[in-house]
């Protein structure tokens, strides 16, 4: 992960290292730069089908790196409306840019005001994992 990684303003992070960026009821979900640093080179990602619904903290995807396989947890509940097809064929995009190009899914949030309780602003998250 390069120092040039630009963290979008307003993202919220979970203790399991996922991030969420709200845009009304549409939320983009991805993995934090810290998670990517810990995983190392990503070699495979399995994403859910469009239309699948997940509750907050439910496993929704799997990611494999040269170091380990990890489950990815939904930071807020909702229905999958888009998956990042580019990372399925080129998972290294996640290593290169986990916020802009390497996002995982977009969801229609079912209850964003309640589900974001307990998530941390990026600066607070970075202090937690430091």
Image (cartoon, rainbow, N blue to C red):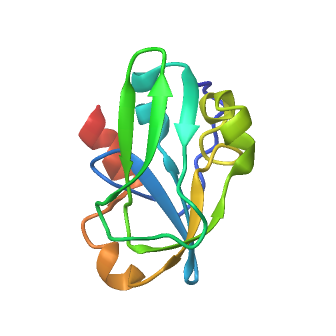
**Residue at screen point 42% across, 33% down:** 34
Q: On the rendered structure, is 78 left or right of 130? A: right
**Residue at screen point 55% across, 25% down:** 42
Quadrant where the C terminus sits is top left
Q: Position of residue 55 (x, y in %)?
A: 33, 71
Q: Position of residue 119 (x, y in %)?
A: 31, 62
Quadrant assignment, res 77: bottom left
> From this viewpoint, is residue 11 visible?
no
Between 102 and 21, the one nearer to me in the picture: 102
Quadrant where the N terminus sits is top right
Q: On the rendered structure, is 33 left or right of 101? A: left
Q: Is residue 89 above or below residue 58?
A: above
Q: Is residue 128 above or below residue 112?
A: above
**Residue at screen point 38% across, 21% down:** 68
Between 64 and 7, the one nearer to me in the picture: 64
Q: Position of residue 52 (x, y in %)?
A: 50, 70
């Amino acid at each position: 992960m390069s120092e040039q990684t630009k963290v979008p303003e307003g993202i919220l992070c979970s203790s399991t290292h996922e991030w969420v960026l709200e845009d009304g009821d549409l939320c983009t979900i991805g993995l934090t730069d810290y998670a990517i640093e810990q995983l190392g080179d990503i070699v495979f990602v399995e994403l859910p089908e469009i239309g699948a619904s997940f509750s907050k903290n439910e496993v929704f995807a799997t990611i494999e790196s040269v170091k380990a396989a990890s489950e990815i947890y939904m930071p807020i509940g909702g229905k999958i409306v888009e998956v990042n097809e580019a990372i399925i064929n080129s998972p290294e995009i996640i290593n290169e840019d986990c916020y802009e190009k390497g996002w995982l899914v977009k969801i229609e949030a079912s209850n964003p005001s309640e589900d974001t309780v307990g998530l941390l602003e990026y600066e607070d998250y970075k202090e937690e994992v430091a």
